Amino acid sequence: MTPRERVWRAIHRQYPDKVPKEAGFTPAAYERFKRETGCDDPAEYFGFETRGVDFKPLNEEDKPDFTPYLERMPDGTRVVSEYGHMQIPGSFYHFARYVFPLAHAETVAEIERFPRPDVTLPYRHEHLEADVKRLHDAGYFVSGFAGHIFENAWQLIGLEKMFIDMLFNPALVEALLERFTEDACFRARRYAEAGVDMLRTGDDVGMQDRMMMDPDIWRRFLKPRLKRVIEAARAVKPDLPVWYHSDGYIMPIVEDLIEVGVTVLNPVQPECMDVHEVKRRYGDRLAFWGTIGTQSVLPFGTPEDVKREVKRMIELFAPGIVIAPTHVIEPDVPWENIVALFEAVEEYGRFE
C-alpha cells in the first residue's frame, strides 16, 4: 500500500495496512533532530506519509508597504507576514510577542486602507499542479492549507479588541474577516484544481477547558466563512476531504464543523477533550488526526508511557486515525520520546 493510499483509507475510516503518522518540529527540536540523526528531513527519516504544497511568497516588488504602521510600533518590532502581522522577538525558543498595527482602528475605512497582499498573482500558484503531480508520483498523500481567518484577523487588531468589537463594532470585524475569507476561498479552489488529496483549514478557538468565545458568536462570525471556504474547494472537487484544526476544547461546535463539511478533526487534545466521548459521538462521521498530548505524555512521560498512549489511541480510534502530536514538538520533549512515538506506531498500528 502506498503512503497516499494509507492515509486515504484512514481518513475515510477504513483499515489501511498500518496507521499513518505525521509531526511538526519547532526550530529547536528540529536542530536536535539533525544532531541526533545527521538527517535534515524528519518526514523522510521517520517515514511520514504526508506532504504539503503551498503558494509561493510575494516577489519583493509586490510586497505591501507597511512602513507607516511599523513606524508607530515599539523598537524591535518586525513584520513577520505578508499580511502585516508584527512581532517583537522573544528570548524563549520560538515564541514572540505580537503587536497590533490596527489596534486603534474604529472604522471599516481604516481596515480597507490597510495594505493587502495579492494571493491571486499567477506566479504564486501556477506551480501547484506540477508540485502535486510530483508528490503523487512519489506515492505521497498531498494537502494544502487554505489559511487562517480568525487568527489572521485578531493578530492585526488584538484579541481583546476583536472580542469587544464582535459585540460593539461588528462591521469592523466583518470587514477584517472578509479579506482573509476571500483569500482562503481562492487558495482552497486552487488547491482543489491542482488535485490535492485533502484541504486543510482551521483557527484556534478553544482554550484548555472552554471555547474562547460563546459558540453562538463563533456561529455568527466564523461558521459561515468556513462553509464558504469548503464550498469553494468542493465546487471543483465535490468529494474532497476537509481537515480542521483547533487546539483546546471545541466540543460545542463539532456538530457545526460536520454540518459545514469537515471530515477530519485535528488535533483532539486529550488534556482538553474527553477522547472517549469524541469517539462515541463523532466516530461514525469524522476521522481524527493527532491525539498524542504535547502538554502531558510527550514532554513528561517516559518512552514506555509514550508507547502506551499511542497504543491506547490506536485501539480507541482505529481505523479512522492518523497519529501525530497535538502540536509541533517542543524543545522540552526528550529525544527518546520522539523515537518512541514513531516506534509505537510501527509496533501497534499494523493491520496486515
Image (cartoon, helix red, strand yellow):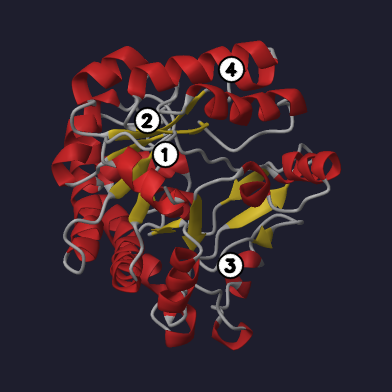
Answer yes or no: do the residues labelled 1 and 4 have beta carbons within 8 Å?
no
* Disc 3/disc 4 C-alpha distance (Å): 49 Å
Sequence order check, earlier mark of 2 and 3: 3
Where is residue 126? Give x, y as percent: 43, 83
Front-most of 308 and 256?
308
- For disc 2, the marked residue is 212
Answer yes or no: do the residues labelled 3 and 4 have beta carbons within 8 Å?
no
- For disc 4, the marked residue is 307
Q: Residues within 10 Å of mark 2 (few under 14, many from 20)?
A: some
Residue kind at label 3, given as amino acid type? Tyr
* Disc 1/disc 4 C-alpha distance (Å): 28 Å
Front-most of 293 and 19?
19
Image: 80 above or below 5? below
* Disc 1/disc 3 C-alpha distance (Å): 26 Å
* Disc 2/disc 4 C-alpha distance (Å): 32 Å
SS of the residue under disc 1 = loop
Where is residue 61? Give x, y as percent: 59, 88
Image: 307 above or below 73? above
Residue kind at label 4, given as amino acid type? Lys
Where is residue 108? Give x, y as percent: 31, 64
SS of the residue under disc 4 = helix
Q: Residues within 10 Å of mark 4 (few under 14, many from 20)?
A: many
Sequence order check, earlier mark of 3 and 4: 3
Sequence order check, earlier mark of 1 and 4: 1
Sequence order check, earlier mark of 2 and 1: 1
Residue kind at label 1, given as amino acid type? Asp
- For disc 3, the marked residue is 69
